[in-house]
Image (cartoon, coloured by chain):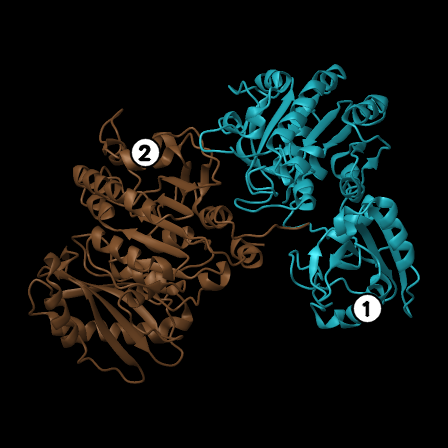
Chain colours: A cyan, B brown
Amino acid sequence: MDNLTLMRKLSIPAETKIVMLVIDGLGGLPQELGGPTELEAAHTPNLDALAARSICGLSVPVAAGITPGSGPAHLALFGYDPLRYEVGRGVLEACGIGFDLGKDDVAARGNFCTVDGEGRITDRRAGRIPTEKGTELCKLLRTIKLEGVEIFVEPVREYRFVLVLRGEGLSAEIADTDPQQLGVPPLPVKALTPEAEGTAALVERWVEQAKALLADQHPANMLVLRGFSKDPCLPKMGEIYKLKTAAIATYPMYRGLARLVGMDVLQTGESLEEELETLEAHWADYDFFYFHVKKTDSAGEDGDFEGKVSIIEHVDELVPSFLELGPDVLIVTGDHSTPAALKSHSWHPLPTLLYSRYCRPDAVKRFSEGECAQGALGRFPATDLMPLAMANALRLTKFGA
Amino acid sequence: MDNLTLMRKLSIPAETKIVMLVIDGLGGLPQELGGPTELEAAHTPNLDALAARSICGLSVPVAAGITPGSGPAHLALFGYDPLRYEVGRGVLEACGIGFDLGKDDVAARGNFCTVDGEGRITDRRAGRIPTEKGTELCKLLRTIKLEGVEIFVEPVREYRFVLVLRGEGLSAEIADTDPQQLGVPPLPVKALTPEAEGTAALVERWVEQAKALLADQHPANMLVLRGFSKDPCLPKMGEIYKLKTAAIATYPMYRGLARLVGMDVLQTGESLEEELETLEAHWADYDFFYFHVKKTDSAGEDGDFEGKVSIIEHVDELVPSFLELGPDVLIVTGDHSTPAALKSHSWHPLPTLLYSRYCRPDAVKRFSEGECAQGALGRFPATDLMPLAMANALRLTKFGA
């Protein structure tokens, strides 16, 4: 019996409230041997005091050694086995911009990029063109029509867009055209299964026409596509956990992911303070809040150790406001590690604390990778977090007689 | 999705090198309450210093409480779920001597033994007869011919040999004739399934004739067979991990096992120094080295606590030479525990360290059972080691978007 089946069977209604504060890319690495990680370097008196009243551990998003993308990492936090439930990047992006994806639509994530005279990619993000420019280019691409299929080209942000194909018998089994490296041309559109040949041929024609339309643009004179996918029709959190769930996140992909698992995605602003105001404003309306902090991950990706430290310190300053709301369960964790030392997501497990009146606090006094490794939760699968949250919220009945 | 599928999907080529130093039977037990284990009694300044820069834990070869044979224990280290991939002892021994096992051959491990006048076993190893004597006895047994089947009797070392049957429709579902105890006769040849009746009848006739041929030999006047098995056709490490893999091991069974998972088995000498020279000589040629130390296990099996301590200390002296080669990832572990106190393999998890630039070192300062129990890897399945090694070698791409 998997986690979700067990939760569906045992969950009961209650009045308690759960907050899951996800600090994206939270886990880190020392810059030099013996040095502190980003979290250890940060001055976090509030998180430390909370850790002292919590049960702590290191959560493993997918499996030992596996570096997760944001999709699987978040699914695990919400209790979905990420090896069982796969969500493609295209679907995530489409949901993230509130695109109403049909059951049979095929979505892909697109990047406008820059290619040289030989067609080799020189900038995978086309100099991070402004959103206005990206929107204008999407409008240009909308002029491409292909027979038998409806095409949507939707801007996401800066150089990013979503391509959606709507029609009969489309397949998402199409390889990425994004080679994810510089100095080589975009990959040709390729079907991964014989059934996908027809869809691949459509996409190929679309890319050819797009290439011609973009040729004299600068710097966004080409595009790459990845993560062709369809709506995976995930079971919804509300049914599984009998919770009214809400997401507070600024970045489209996380909003999209929350929508896929059935959360209400709340309107909010760009700053942490605005996100917090949203939480406060909707406190009475929901049982479960997913609260997402994006900028730690961005700083990690940029290799900006100090930047990541100061965002963690900013989050720490808000912790008392979270506590003032009186959540029955407050979890602080990350979806995956993004050490500045690696400038990318990594496989390292996540420092995690779970605070509730019934958590049985351990000896951890400081919220850090090192101390959480000594916590009573040990090294645990991230999919355990929701069952633990539900238990601590007294929202699960007994298993068996 | 199992570990190997995930590795096959996520592994990418790189220039990094991984060394897995397997100290056979490494884990131990105190001789008396409160005393040190073999590893704790050993003076290991180099391993301790390495542990301080590493992430540590206790690895569980198969499952809690399960004492593994060398086959499953090693498969787990190489990332193969030992409950899913079973390799029989006969196959292991055959591969260990470089026997070219056919797809349908049935192999069994044989021991020459000593029986008394009543046919009861008095020495399961026939006084450890020299290899020359064992070879001579194998030649004698090769005179036995059975219709419809080709028979190979190959000496391994001392009292050990391999019996291989080659023919149509043979089954390996035959029970051991080795009772693994003294004072009782060898067990009769018994089919474990109806389909194996024919093969069992052949083996029975072979054993009868062998018994007659050996009757006036001394001390090796009988034999026992175990581990009837066929080539399990394991997926190969090179394909799974995109690594060029090499094994440095002196003992036939470990060489055989390495061959089964697709490693190149390097010529080497009997001493640790010679094994190390082999590693140094082939450093440029491979990405992954499995380096096996046998004598710790032998000392444990003999109940020789001090002997095991001194072999561990010998390994410790070689650690700087491993580091001088500059491996990107260095793992030090065992395949299973062999406490001198038990004179046998045991179920106890294995002190393990993983050193790499990106390992996120924990608080462990001493390579010991006690300190590794506090390590950030916690108590983890041995099958996690290869994914962790691959991640730390930056040889895995991200899972999902």
The residue located at (70%, 69%) in the rendering is A193
Left or right: A59 as drawn, with respect to B48: right
User: What is the x, y in percent for residue B348?
Assistant: 35, 39
Q: Mark 2: give few (<14), some (14-19) or many (20+) Cα within 10 Å.
A: some
Nearer to me, A199 or B150: A199
Who's the residue at 76% across and 52% down the image?
A: A126
Which of the 4 quarters of the picture holds residue B231? bottom left
- The residue indicated by pointer 1 is A208
The residue drawn where x is 40% and y is 75% is B103
SS class, disc 2: helix
Towards the viewer: B348 or A275: A275
Label 1 to label 2, Cα distance in Å? Answer: 60 Å
Say which quadrant the C terminus of chain A sits in: top right
From the viewer's perspective, is A320 left or right of B221?
right
The residue tagged 2 is: B48
Q: Residue furthest bottom?
A: B147
- Give A103 or A3, whichever is nearer the viewer: A103
> What amino acid does circle 2 point to?
Asp
